[in-house]
Image (spheres, grey):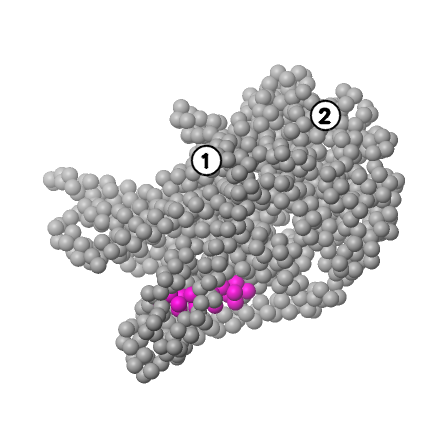
Amino acid sequence: MRFSRAILVAIAIIAIVSGVIVFKHVFTSGFTGSGRVVLRGAGATFLQPQLEAWIEAFMEEHKNIVIEYSGIGSGAGQKQFFKGLVDFCGSDPPLSRSRWEEYRGRVLQLPVILGALAVVYNIPEIPRDIHLNLTGRVLALIYLGEIRFWDDPRILELNPALADKLPHKEIIAVHRSDSSGSTQIFTTFLHKAAPDIWPKKLVGKVVDWPVDKVGNGVGAKGNAGVTATVVNTEYSIGYVELSYAIKNNLQVAAIMNREGYFTLPTVESIQSAAMYALKAGILPSKPDGDFSRELEAIVYAGGKNSYPITAFSHIFVWKSYDDVEKARAIKRFLEWLYNNDSKYIVEGYVPLPVEVKKLWMEAVKMIEG
Amino acid sequence: MTNTPREDRLFFYTLLPFASIVIAIFIALFVSLIENSIPVILREGLSFLTSNVWIACEDNPSLEFYGILAPVVGTIVTSVTALTLALPLSIALALVVLEYTPVKIRSLLSCLIDVMAGLPTVIYGLWGLFVLAPILRDYVMYSLYRYLWLVPLFSIEPTTPTTVFTASIVLAVMIIPFMTRLIIEAYNLIPIKYREAALALGFTKFEYVRTMLSLARPAIIAASLLGWGRAAGETVAVAMTIGNSFTVGLSLFSPGYTISSLIANQFPNAEFYYYMYSALYGAGLVLLVIGLTVNSIAVVILARWRRIVHGD
Amino acid sequence: MEIDGRMVLDKVFTLLVILLALLAFTPILWILGSVFVNGVKAFTREGLSVLFKTPSSPLSSSLGGIGPALLGTLILIVLTTIIGLPVAFFTAVLATEYPHTLLARIVNVLVRSLLGLPTILVGMLVYTLIVIPMGRFSAIAGAIALAIILLPYTYTYVENALNTIPRDYREAAYSIGLTKAGALLRVFIGIARRGIVAGILVGLSRACGETAPLLFTIGGSSRIYFTGLDQPIDAIPLLVYRYALTPYENYHALAWCGALVLTLIYLAIFLTARIVVRGVEVD
């Protein structure tokens, strides 16, 4: 009798406390849905640090709009977007030709930022001021499971300065476990740099990694997951967006570009790759156009200063939304972005040239509401 | 029901919707699992289970091919290893609680075991990832590899902290309290007359305990099956510690996948592809069959054993 | 002194058992210890506000907090009770009051076999049946998934409580002309109420910490506390899983903080259930 009354009291207290918290946050700060517009987005983790920085700055100025972004990978993000589970999505690669046809005229693709995949490694023997040199072919051989040790002659050949430092340790090749735009960019690079050993069927957001089959591959979720795994695993190698490498102080490899120069991912080398790609005229003039050739053009681009694993990252929005408030909020965000994007650039990203940014204002005109 | 009063029959009908919800859940589960896995089974047949590939292609569905050999093997290897480690430890822990602890501490100890049996598994995963994994790699896995590398299980040099071995240990730690509790419950069910008989014979503690354990053997087998089922079905604690890689092999020191960690990793993007959703449902079906079979066998063994020891 | 083989064997056995038990028991203390130590660290860094604030950005010096996840977990607990309790309770009533009907037998077997169902399958099922048709992740979908987890636990306790009502009470109730429904309402619930309360609590203690059923159902969020039951929310287990897999030190701290808070919520529910159950035994 006494006990069950105590239980009732305890439950009542829990209910009241949670009620108060709900009240405090739901009503007093106005999260009722009527006063505030909530935009939900999901997708690439490649652009997440940059997007979050913009969103935070944007929300400071627009108290009635809340933007939520969850980094779940480009594949899952696109899926949720097309299922209507989220209002916009982030994706590194543009829509493939077939998907673009499927949603033609309804979906708008906007390149928002330039970024680069850094090839990162964790080899304690290598001093931080020396960068490991790698080529697309050697990376392909590593992810094929054919180069298994760090002191393989094919790696030593590229790194005469490190000849006595590279240990006889097995290489752990870290890759994404989710459906990821970063993986698509990385494998596109491997295919373009070494088409004879890295076939087209190993290019995509999800790849059947040959290195897994020999027991030296590790999968991790998101750019953050790959970063964490490389940090925790000695003698591992992985690919992450440059900002993750910088923030977490990872060792970054210099990659041989199309012209045969070893380049590090820097603002200049990323811009150089973008300039070469844009000169090829690969971007359509309207956001509802076909962007599907863009990735092919920017990865392994020409130019002796170009970093070879550079890419645009995109957000996708609908041309019309059922909820006009959402359409207006998205337009507000894009306008704000047009004027403010370069003020809040996170280290490891490069703002878009003005001619590409014009697409955003085109989109603002096209979105209905 | 023919002889029951009208009011009682009415009451039965008012309860009906609630009971039908339970049945509906099961029908929905089976229908959705079977229906959704048909495409992949029709397309790939048995090679869905026997091949180790995971080819997704967003432009060309005809290139897609999914084989879940690695996750199936991973599920079996992790759960069997976990059970092998957990069983002797659980029996020992149960015995200590029951026979070697003063009454005052006993209830505290058994309460603590109950608490751990229900502790959220994500906490086991968190501890496994941050606390256990680095220690396991640096101390346990390296020494096993150094001295026992001839044994196929330990033949690969451990390089990552997240491996099949790590996940197995986390699972073992997770099912120990669960199995200990089941063994304690079973032990307590042994009728007092057997205990008295054993004590009257002047048995030493060892002989007494051995007799009790042999009486409880079916219950211990059932507890093992239930613990095994729990280990095989666990998701997050494994996904956090196994390394998520399509490796098939006998070595415990390489990363791997289990069925449920595969689903946790791939399901969010599955519908982006044409057959992956179906492939994951197929994997889920395998998991369901394993889970329900093991569980039902255990329940039957337990029920039969209760009837025998109580002689009714 | 005579050396008795039996006694030596006995001693060796005792030693072995105690050693193995220590080995089995160490991780229990180790886990609780590391959750406590690391969780408290987060509280000393941020104070109690860690319970209310939203997570900070990665690598910033402050932690922010687990506010949306904590609120989400509390909401899910309430919702899960509302959805799961009636089903578990009335199903148990059916099983005990009409034990010889085919339906009761089927239901009894099915509910119990839910205990052996891998919880990730519940997440897949709810995703397919509720999230896709609704067109969004939602608190409701998460609560339905958790209610399925809660069902077998609560059912077992309630059924047990109703079954152990002494025969005399049953006969007395029926002899004064009460129908089954009347007897249940006026007599049985009163007698079995501790068992019923314990059943809910034990079910909730299991459901509140589940992660797998939430992975594909509630969506998660970090800036938004709550915008409606049909909208995505966050939960502590999901936050712990998500943040543990990032490389950021402040997110790891939040994951530990979440683990501590989750453990405390779980302990509060679980220990209350224990007290209630003990009450049943004393009665």
Query: Does residue B84 appear left or right of residue B137 in this picture?
Result: left
Specify whether residue C89 is painted magenta. Answer: yes
- The vertical placement of C136 against A166, above or below, is below
Determine whether, in the image, residue B93 is placed left or right of residue A113: left
Quadrant that contains the N terminus of chain A: bottom left
User: Which residue in the rendered view is the most extreme toward the bottom?
Assistant: C176
Give, as a three-letter code, the residue at label 1: Val
Q: Amino acid at mark 2?
A: Lys
Residue numbers of the magenta segment? C79-96
The label number, if any, that marks residue B178 in the structure image: none
Q: How many marks?
A: 2
Q: Main secondary structure of the magenta part?
A: helix
Q: Which residue bears the numbered disc 2?
A: A192
Mark 1 and mark 2, same subunit? no
| Residue A69 screen position, x and y as percent | 69, 50
Note whether B289 is above or below C169 in the view shown. above
Quarter of the rendering occupied by the C terminus of chain A: bottom right
Pointers 1 and 2 in contact (C-beta within 8 Å): no
Is there any visible trace of residue B44 in the rendered image?
yes
Mark 1 sits on what residue?
Answer: B73
Q: Residue at x 46, y 63 (%)?
A: B20
| SS under mark 2 | helix
Q: Residues within 10 Å of mark 1 (few under 14, many from 20)?
A: many
At horizontal 44% and vertical 67% (from top left) the residue drawn is B16
Q: Is residue A137 magenta?
A: no
Position in image of residue C218 (x %, y %): 60, 55
